[in-house]
Image (tube, helix red, strand yellow):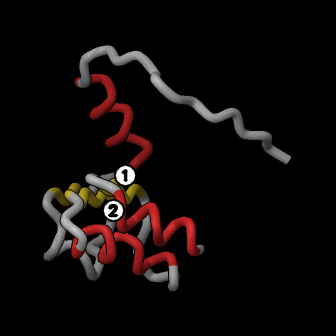
Amino acid sequence: MREAQQAALRCDLMLVAGSSLQVFPAANLPAMAHRNGAVLIIINREETHLDHAANVVLHADVAEALPAIAARLPAVRAVHMRETKVT
């Protein structure tokens, strides 16, 4: 959790996708980032307690919204990818 908090304090942008922001302490991370100057984008079907503070709010299903957003972005080259094992 400490690493997540440190990352939230360093980030320039935080994208919250598909979270009601009801499970603490992780639900505090977007507010931490926003208070530290990060742009906050929330994509969730329902309203969250941070919608009023977010720079962008989309009330949508993330399974539909994220592919639609990605389809409109210019092609980008991955500069860093971390391989993750699924167990």
Q: Position of residue 20 (x, y in %)?
A: 41, 73
Which one is in front, 18 or 30? 30
Q: Position of residue 70 (x, y in %)?
A: 33, 29
Residue at figure coordinates x 36%, y 39% from the top left: 66
Q: Residues within 10 Å of mark 1 (few under 14, many from 20)?
A: some
**Which corner quadrant of the image does residue 73 belong to?**
top left
Which amino acid type is shown beneath numbered disc 1?
Answer: Asp
Q: In the image as oriented, which residue stretches furthest toward the right?
A: 87
Residue 5's place in the image compared with 71, above or below, is below
Q: Position of residue 61 (x, y in %)?
A: 37, 51
Which amino acid type is shown beneath numbered disc 2?
Answer: Arg
Where disc 1 sits, the SS reads loop
Q: Quadrant of the N terminus?
A: bottom right
Disc 2 marks which residue? 45
Could you tell which of marks 2 and 1 lies nearer the N-terminus? 2
Horizontal side, residue 26 vs residue 85: left or right? left
CB under 8 Å between discs 2 and 1: yes
Which one is in front, 63 or 26? 26
**Which corner quadrant of the image does residue 8 belong to?**
bottom left
Disc 1 marks which residue? 61
Residue at figure coordinates x 45%, y 82% from the top left: 22
How much space separates mark 2 and mark 1, taking CA atoms?
A: 5 Å
